[in-house]
Structure formats: C-alpha cells, structure tokens
Amino acid sequence: MLTDDLILQTLHHSTLTEELRDAEIDILGQLFVVKDFKKGEALLRPGEEKLKNSLIVLASGEVEAIATLSGEQAVLHLLQPGDLAGIITFTGGNVAQISASVVAKTDCKVLLLERSKFEALMTTHPAILYYVMRGIVRYVHGIVRRMNTESVELSNYIYKTQGRF
C-alpha cells in the first residue's frame, strides 16, 4: 500500500477525524509521516524524549500500552488501527507525565504528526485544528470511561468474593 493511501485510510477510520470532511482529511494527512516499528520495539517509554511532541496513530499491527506496577508489567490496553498514543506530550505535557510504555506487540506501522506541523494549521485551517482536538478529547474520554467501567467491575468482583469467605 502506498504511504499516502495508508495515511488516508487510517485517518478515515480514526476518531481523530470523525468531524472532518474528506478534503480536510486530505490536508491533515499531508502533515503525517509513516514509521515502522518491529515487534518488541518501544514507541514510547516514561521519561523518554524519542517521539516527544508527536501524536501517534496506529496504522497497522498491534501495540500495547504497558504499565510497570511494583516491578510487574501489566497490559493496560491493546491498541488497534486508528487508536492514538503520545497524547500527553502532543498536547503540551511533559515526558515526565508519561506513566506507561507503548510497545509494538507485532511489527507495525504508525502515523506520526508533529505538534509544530499541526499548530501551523492555526492560521491556515483553524477548523481542522479545532475538530481534531475535539477528536482527541473524545478519544481520551473513551479511555477514561473504559477504565472507570473496569474499576467498577473489579470492585464488584472483590465485594462479591469477600462475602464468600
């Protein structure tokens, strides 16, 4: 698949561009580059500057968000094509705020959008900037909702099993 086709296909299937028209997706797509990662390779790690200020959109393959808790690794989420990573530094946060590693579970291709290229849309295409940021907020809200649901389910499980002892 050609790079431009991969970028556009991925963007069309991402929450990032839900509110954009095809012509706006084409404009946004020109700002992305494609990068390959091998199985086991880290895209992001806490404190690393590697892809600082870049939004990552998974194009193909599988990527895991992994947290290290008490020396043990726990998979927080398996990313699917169209899913996002690197949101913290892309939106202006510090690498010290990153708490999970993002690691390729299989060979994969990702789309990278540098914040400086994205911010350049402010003067030429502010609506694209606005709608993409809304897409990022929706994506993050979905993560929070999923985590809240899992937390409630875990609490219910613990409460039910404690009653048995």
Image (spheres, helix red, strand yellow):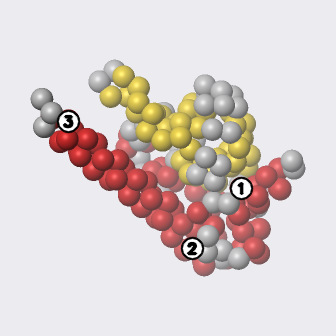
Which tag, 1 or 3, sits closer to the chain's start? 1
What is the x, y in percent for residue 123? 62, 76
Circles 1 and 2: CB distance less than 8 Å?
A: no
Q: Is residue 31 visible?
A: no
- Per the image, label 3 sits on a secondary structure element best described as helix
| Relative depth, front residue between 54 and 155 | 155
Q: Which residue is mark 3?
A: 161
The answer to whether residue 42 is left or right of residue 60 is: left
- Residue type at mark 2: give it: Tyr
Which residue does the image show at 55% across and 74% down from the upper left? 130
What is the x, y in percent for residue 102? 52, 36
Q: CA distance from mark 1 to mark 3?
A: 43 Å
The answer to whether residue 164 is left or right of residue 45 is: left
Q: Which residue is mark 1?
A: 10
- Per the image, label 1 sits on a secondary structure element best described as helix
What is the x, y in percent for residue 110? 68, 44
Residue 4 lies in quadrant: bottom right
State which mark lies toward you, 1 or 2: 1
Which residue does the image show at 61% across and 70% down from the upper left? 18
Outermost residue toward the top? 71
Badge 2 crowding class, 10 Å Cα cut-off, few under 14, some 14 to 19, many 20 or more, is some
State whether residue 62 is above or below residue 143.
above
Which residue does the image show at 41% across and 46% down from the upper left? 94
| Relative depth, front residue between 84 and 149 | 149
| Relative depth, front residue between 148 and 88 | 148
- Residue type at mark 1: give it: Thr
- Per the image, label 2 sits on a secondary structure element best described as helix
- Residue type at mark 3: give it: Thr
What is the x, y in percent for residue 87? 49, 52
Circles 1 and 3: CB distance less than 8 Å?
A: no
Badge 1 crowding class, 10 Å Cα cut-off, few under 14, some 14 to 19, many 20 or more, is many
Q: Which residue is mark 2?
A: 131
